[in-house]
Image (cartoon, rainbow, N blue to C red):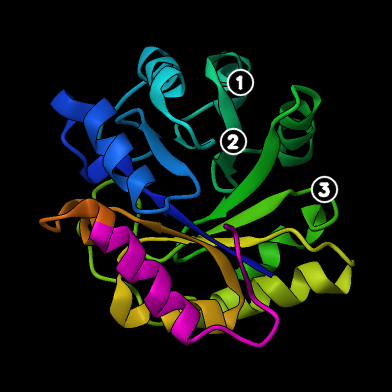
Amino acid sequence: MTLRIAPSILSADFGRLAEDVARVEQGGADLIHVDVMDGRFVPNITIGVPVARALHRVATVPLDIHLMIVEPERHIEAFADAGAAMLSVHVEISPHLHRTLEAIKALGVQAGAVLNPSTPATVVAPVARLVDFVLVMSVNPGFSGQTYIPESARKVRVVRTILDEVHNDAPVEIDGGIQPGNAGDVVAAGAEILVAGSAIYGADDPAEATQALRQAALAGAPMGLRESR
């Protein structure tokens, strides 16, 4: 296992994105998590391809782009061209999930399946051999600053078991309400990529907050977990 911290720009200052990205990179961020929302699949509207492309120009770590949009298959090529290293789509909105994941991989981008809190972990079983990662939402998607759903750690554990059963060492990612108080628990359950927005960008010093989240996660980590750096 390799622990990675992915600050979410959903909680950043959109007028100073380049600076806010640089601050978390100084704190050791491994990825920059980009939430793309269309106001249809989720209530909120955030950013699109031009901002993703601009982020790619300034970021020194990979972009982890989470598509919370209807018909994501229509937009994956554009986000890949914009610089996505990872692209994830929701199982709830992707009726041809195998095809969409294969299309993402064909673009040379890591393909992930996302599960909403009410979606059973077992839904990923049919694509368990195909995914490069699975993202477990630990809040209902759409807005930053929500409270972590405690049952999410158990869901991470089930997803990890499903992947292990098909000998896929793809990481489990978790997003929503992640902060130092629960980071150790989710890592102990099998999460390797921790997305955090308000816990990092809501702090006085996002670089220090990034470091603090990593240390809290490592404190609850199982034997054999490696730091990414």
> Looking at the image, is 210 positioned above or below residue 111?
below
Question: Can residue 109 be seen from the camera position used here?
Answer: yes
User: At 59% across and 17% down in the image, what residue appears?
Assistant: 74
Q: Are marks 1 and 2 in contact (CB under 8 Å)?
A: yes
User: At 39% across and 22% down in the image, what residue appears?
Assistant: 58
- Ranked by sequence position, the earlier of labels 1 and 2 is 1
Which residue bears the numbered disc 3? 130
Looking at the image, is mark 3 or mark 1 nearer the viewer?
1
Q: CA distance from mark 3 to mark 2?
A: 14 Å
- Residue type at mark 1? Ala
User: At 86% across and 74% down in the image, what residue appears?
Assistant: 165
Locate residue 100, reporting x and y percent. 71, 32
Q: Residues within 10 Å of mark 1 (few under 14, many from 20)?
A: many
Is residue 217 part of the magenta span, yes or no?
A: yes
Which residue bears the numbered disc 2? 87
Residue 59 occupies which quadrant of the picture? top left
Q: CA distance from mark 3 to mark 1?
A: 18 Å
Q: Look at the image and tell me in which quarter the N terminus lies.
A: bottom right
Q: Is 195 placed left or right of 147 in the picture?
A: right
- Ranked by sequence position, the earlier of labels 3 and 2 is 2
- Ranked by sequence position, the earlier of labels 3 and 1 is 1
> Looking at the image, is 101 positioned above or below residue 48?
below
Residue 80: image tag = 1
In the rendered structure, which segment of residues is drawn in magenta? 208-229
- Residue type at mark 2? Leu
Q: Residues within 10 Å of mark 3 (few under 14, many from 20)?
A: many
User: At 32% across and 36% down in the image, what residue appears?
Assistant: 21
Q: Is 71 placed left or right of 77 in the picture?
A: left
Locate residue 78, reporting x and y percent. 56, 13
- Residue type at mark 3? Leu
Locate residue 45, reporting x and y percent. 26, 29
